[in-house]
Image (cartoon, rainbow, N blue to C red):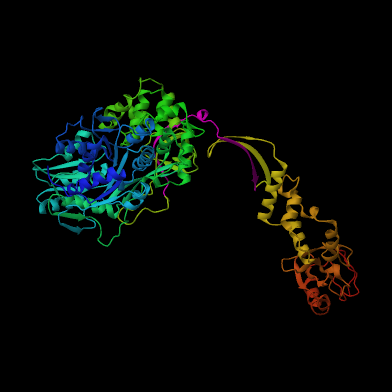
Amino acid sequence: MLQLPIDPFIPGIVDEVRRSRAAVIVAAPGAGKTTRVPPALADDGRVVLLQPRRAAARAIAGRIAVERGWTLGRDVGWQMRFDRNFTASTRLLVVTEGILTARAQTDPLLSDFQTIVLDEFHERSIHADLAIALARQAWRARDDLRIVVMSATIDPGPVAGFLDGCPVTHVPGRLHPLTISYAPGETVAVAAREMLAVTPGNVLCFLPGAAEINRAITDISRELTSDVDVVPLHGSLSADDQDRALQPSSRRRIVVATNIAETSVTVPGVTAVVDTGLQKVARYDADRGIDSLDLERITADSADQRAGRAGREAPGDVRRLWDARDRLRPHREPDIRRIDLSTAALDVIAWGGSPLGFDWFERPTDDAVRAAMTLLVRLGLVADGRLTEAGDKARTLPLHPRLAAMLIASGGARDVVRACALLSERPLLPPRAATTTSDLLSAIDQWPTVAPQVARAADDIARLLPRAATIDEAAFRRSLLAGYPDRVGQRRAAGSDSFLLASGTGATLARESGVRDAEFIVALDVQDRAHASARAQPPRGDRAVTPAIRIASSVERDWLEPTSREVVHRFDSAEGRVSAVEVTRYDALVLRERPVPVDGEVAAQLLADAWLERGPRGDDEQLVRRLAFAGHEVDVASLVRAAAAGARTLDDIHVLRSLPLAIVRDLERDAPERIAVPSGRSVALQYDERLHVSASVKLQELFGLAETPRVGKRRTPVQLMLLAPNGRPVQVTQDLRSFWERTYPEVRKELRGRYPKHPWPEDPWTATPTASAKRRDQK
């Protein structure tokens, strides 16, 4: 057996685990921790090894079998979603995803195992976080259970602290020298061909996803000689195709992979790495109910691990397709901070705990846990903090709670099984019909054309169910609603692609969807399109681009059970009136409205608010100014609200009616509405915001008046706007005596010929004031 750097440390690790029942191992890439530590611990009893990736689990089991001379499937085996190869006598079981969690639900003490090993813990998958928390509960209840946590880049302090201060072992690796170069802007195809020319071994290229891998393979293959194979490696491939990329070959290779090849699995013969520095990271916004698959920069520890793949067997070369001056974030973000926690919450409840009170390794925010619990309740899987009958069925299905709820609602219908496979595997769907009631039905109608991994997933799901029921098209669509009750959308207008989702978020129906006519839909795949710029910086906090509904299914209005009813009062600014309707809603969506009688108190409040927002007009405006002129400090808002009582329109509000009688009397004295003039009439006074007062009056009505009228406590002179017979001002004055003496002769001279029927005496002091146009003899 090939000697590896960790081998001299194995006896000490085994002793520490026996003594402390827990250990943290930080071993550099290539040290051999994954294939050497778990089998060494199996000498004391059965070991379960948790691996975050399915491809790695099979490869590790096979490698251990070869190194130890064990029988694959008997001494060492694996168990993962829809795939298993082990027996009751298996000494070392490699598991993935939620397998360990599912075992803890039926056997909280994990009594089938002596040692639990959590590998690649630095990836901080939600399954690993939940596994270490559940394992610690069993560890404290059993004095013979051991826990070992392993990683190449982890900070061991928090993990060791979580395991009561257990010992930490650091193991150096055996990494050959690396030459690292940077080529920002260079394509993967160019970099791969250049690296192939300067290295004797294979080239491993890291890209963010399957679509990018397929494009890169096409570009790389254009100019390659026939003696070089270009091989993909990503999670959507079948087990056989994944194994093909991990097996030795007599031909040189360029392996184009996602970050599945960063850790645990070893791609043989690699002496060069091309790294785009990109990854796809799933995120979930519980407030908006929106998923995003953001294209982001990798972290520094991930870049180091990718580079290390080139130096495991010989000196290596690394080509990084970004600028050397770029600074990467040091560590990746744990799943528990960024994804939907409904699966984890369901697992904790099935185990017998409360997600809010659970002793997590890293506690999620209460808001994230509550959002997950709200969804589980809405799916009908949880009630009063416990599993319902449907929830008990859902926990046995290795599917997201949404998909489990769909299956349960449909009774395990074949088409819903296929819909679950499509939603679970997230492939590009076949071209959809121009118009359809459901994009998933359109895809299922073309089932022979779906991606192989989707067909395999559907077969795997079907094997979990007692029968394949048949349901009609409407029942199929109702089953989809059962899994996504919070993702209902309402078309904003007929013929529009714009929708309002039940969360209150706006979204746009993508062009590839064929659900073009329905008013209501269930948005089965809603993706935030505001991805971060992959080559510029980490993800932005804003989400300026409207989310896209890529997969939809129509929903009938009468399927939607109202979530709330309320009476809504509205002020119509055009009519100045308040109306009331009863609004029936499905979350943020309006299902229907019907008119109802107006509540007087609510109407008064709305009318008062509208009055205050608009400000005083007409008589009320003058009243407010008169109060200020008279020196009264009053709460106008309170007066308006009092005046609005019983009002039905804005014009019904008269502030004067709400004034105390004493203030009304004071106003008549200190800020009168009108004053008398010599003609016998009274004219209105106008008060302005500067506490000035004025009046407009025809010149002839003031004959004989020498002193300017004054009002108020301060005896403020009234500014007189003297009007010609046509009502137009001819003079503005606060000194009436001066007007008669100096200005009137000129005014008389100018206007007497124009208005001969009106009196224009030479002596205004003795003339009789009049408001009529009756002509008198003039000197």
Q: What x and y, as percent, mark residue 735?
A: 81, 76
Q: State which region is magenta.
A: 545-573
The quarter in which the N terminus is drawn is: top left
How many discs appear? 0
Q: What x and y, as percent, mark residue 95?
A: 28, 36
| Nearest the eye: 704 or 73 | 73
Q: Is residue 392 left or right of residue 58?
A: right
Q: Is residue 510 left or right of residue 120?
A: right
**Does 566 lie within the magenta span?**
yes
| Nearest the eye: 5 or 286 | 5
Q: Quadrant of residue 616?
A: bottom right
Asked if residue 91 can be seen in this view, the reply is: yes
The quarter in which the C terminus is drawn is: bottom right
Q: Is residue 465 left or right of residue 641?
A: left
Asked if residue 488 can be seen in this view, the reply is: no
Compared with residue 581, is residue 606 higher up or lower down, i.e. above or below?
below
Compared with residue 667, is residue 282 higher up or lower down, i.e. above or below?
above
Q: Quadrant of residue 40?
A: top left
Compared with residue 567, is residue 537 higher up or lower down, i.e. above or below?
below
**Does 395 lie within the magenta span?**
no
Q: What x and y, as percent, mark residue 140?
A: 38, 40
Q: What x and y, as percent, mark residue 684?
A: 81, 62
| Nearest the eye: 143 or 76 | 143
